[in-house]
Image (cartoon, rainbow, N blue to C red):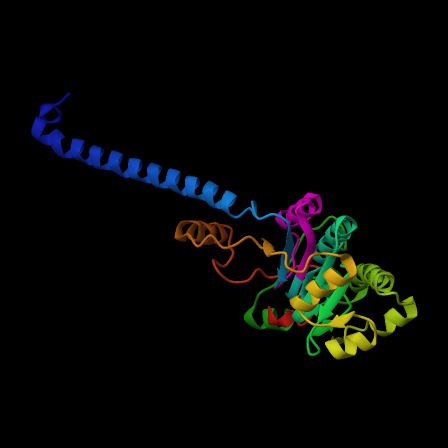
Amino acid sequence: MSDISRDPAQMIPANAKLRRSGRRWRVLFFLALAIAVLALVGRFAMTPSGIGDRIARVSIVGTILTSPQRAQILQDLAEDDAVKAVIIAINSPGGTTAGGEELYEGLAKLREAKPVVSVVSELGASAAYMTAISTDRIFARRLSIVGSIGVLFQHVDAGKLLDTIGVDLDKVATGPLKAEPDLDEPLTGAPRVALQSLVDDSFAWFVDIVAERRGLTRPETLELSDGRIFTGRQALAVKLIDDFGGEPEAVAWLESDREVEADLPIVDYYPLPERGWWASDWLGRAARQAIGLDGSGPIALDGLVSLWQAGTL
């Protein structure tokens, strides 16, 4: 060991640096611990309890995707004896076909246990309408937008653009339809046939459940299933909704037809309330950015969708 390494004067700055580093790590540890404790407290605080009988509200807003959390909440509502009815508040242009199916099936099981009524505010189209028909009764405003019964798959042919900038795409695949359609080619031939079959199969199921739930014949349903949207007034005339109104009218129906007390408190169950903690927001944004997603923007849909005005996403 050299003389310099034994010099106490040389060691003092290093020891001070180590102490500062240790303090920083302790501060970070206690900060992380505090966030964890607050998260647990907040989670229990968000669970409705101690208020007796109630009506639950589940809000379906924005683009519909599959959600294990939402599916679990619907299951829990079916098993909660304190929840006497459920209002599904809808304001959505639709979303993925799988997300709509998940909601349809979850609500079908829920309505076997207790009354479920949907209320469409501005918009209840495509997968959102798929959601609404799974309830016992559909309310909408006279000028709400509903319907858009259909399925789509969109493809962008950027071949000319890529040729202009000198980009050539190539691939090695296990079969002729793997990863089709290609971004640099038009949607034709076998890829188009395969995707049309995919769309047709999903559409057939959508039409069948609309016919079943709305008491229409299949030909009558097909006449309404060209993708068009309807105002609430038009939708009532063709039996796509049951009545005009909002949440007060839905509660009145629950009282008159399902003997649910009208003065029960209405409690939000989904989505869970925003915690409003900067740390959790920051961590969420950081996680999205870490996997290449925008930190705050919407998630783009990829695949088969049942959506009105997909271009607005």
In the picture, measured across the screen, residue 7 lies left or right of residue 203, that is left
Q: In the image, what residue occupies the spot 69% across and 51% down? A: 84
Q: In the image, what residue occupies the spot 67% across and 60% down? A: 262
Percent across and percent down for residue 192 are: 79, 64
Q: Quadrant of the C terminus?
A: bottom right
Percent across and percent down for residue 208 are: 86, 61
Who is closer to the viewer here, 266 or 157?
266
Please, is residue 45 above or below residue 177 in the view? Answer: above
Who is closer to the viewer here, 238 or 187?
238
> In terms of image quadrants, where is residue 65?
bottom right
Q: Is residue 196 magenta?
A: no
Q: Quadrant of the N terminus?
A: top left
Q: Which residues are magenta?
A: 62-88
> In terms of image quadrants, where is residue 151?
bottom right
Percent across and percent down for residue 309 are: 66, 72
Please, is residue 82 above or below residue 205 in the view? Answer: above
Is residue 133 at all visible to an observer of this figure? no
In the picture, measured across the screen, residue 64 lies left or right of residue 4, that is right
Q: Is residue 65 magenta?
A: yes
Percent across and percent down for residue 258 are: 77, 57
Please, is residue 123 above or below residue 71 in the view? Answer: below
